[in-house]
Amino acid sequence: MISRRGLPLVLIIAGLMTACSAQATAPVTDSSSGVPVSVEGGAYTNITPAQLADLLKSKDFFFANTHIPYEGEIEQTDGFIPYDEITQRLSELPADKNAKIVLYCRSGRMSAIAAEALVKGGYTDVWNLDGGMIAWEEAGFSLKGE
């Protein structure tokens, strides 16, 4: 039997175990959702290759490759804007800061940097291909122009 002194400790441990198990989430399979990444000024959304493939079926967004140097591209890419020049080349993006913009690069690192810069600049609907073209190819999708 648990003493009155030990009861609070048991309740705290039970609460922590419940909280930790509640953090596990089901894999994202809906193309309209993704994993939000909080950054200064808001958040962008990381998506998987499968989610991007679903989005490309009814493309309604500006799609940019931010990788330098050029190492190929995903079909339907609208623009090539180096990740470290994204804020200097805003004229190449939709003028509406609420327009949906999806970014990618080779591994996901450069496009994540670009996504963060856009969010800091006031863009509200920024998406990033998590894992980039490497994850895209590993998921069985092809690149063009390699």
Image: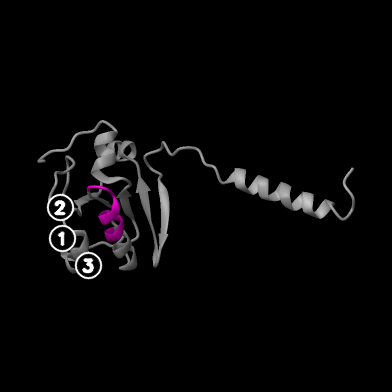
Position of residue 40 relative to residue 133, above or below, is below
Quadrant, the C terminus = top left
Secondary structure, mark 2, is strand
Q: Residue at x 84, y 52 (%)?
A: 6
Give x and y (percent) for residue 54. Answer: 30, 36
Residue found farthest to the left: 145
In the displayed structure, does residue 129 sit left or right of residue 35?
Answer: left
Disc ID at residue 79: 2
Residue bearing the label numbered 1: 92
Give x and y (percent) for residue 90. Answer: 19, 65
Q: Residue at x 26, y 61 (%)?
A: 96
Q: CA distance from mark 2 to mark 1?
A: 8 Å
Q: What is the three-letter code of the residue carrying label 3?
A: Thr
Q: What is the three-letter code of the residue carrying label 2?
A: Gly
Position of residue 39 relative to residue 15, above or below, is below
Callouts 2 and 1 close, C-beta under 8 Å = yes
Position of residue 55 relative to residue 111, above or below, is above
Q: Is residue 58 visible?
A: no
Residue bearing the label numbered 3: 87
The quadrant in which residue 86 appears is bottom left
Give x and y (percent) for residue 61. Answer: 25, 49
Q: What is the three-letter code of the residue carrying label 1?
A: Glu
Q: Earlier in the sequence, mark 3 or mark 1?
A: 3
Near mark 1 (Cα within 10 A), the count class, few <14, some 14-19 or many ≥20, is some
Q: CA distance from mark 3 to mark 2?
A: 14 Å
Q: Is residue 64 visible?
A: yes
Q: CA distance from mark 3 to mark 1?
A: 10 Å
Which residues are the magenta region?
106-114
Disc ID at residue 142: none
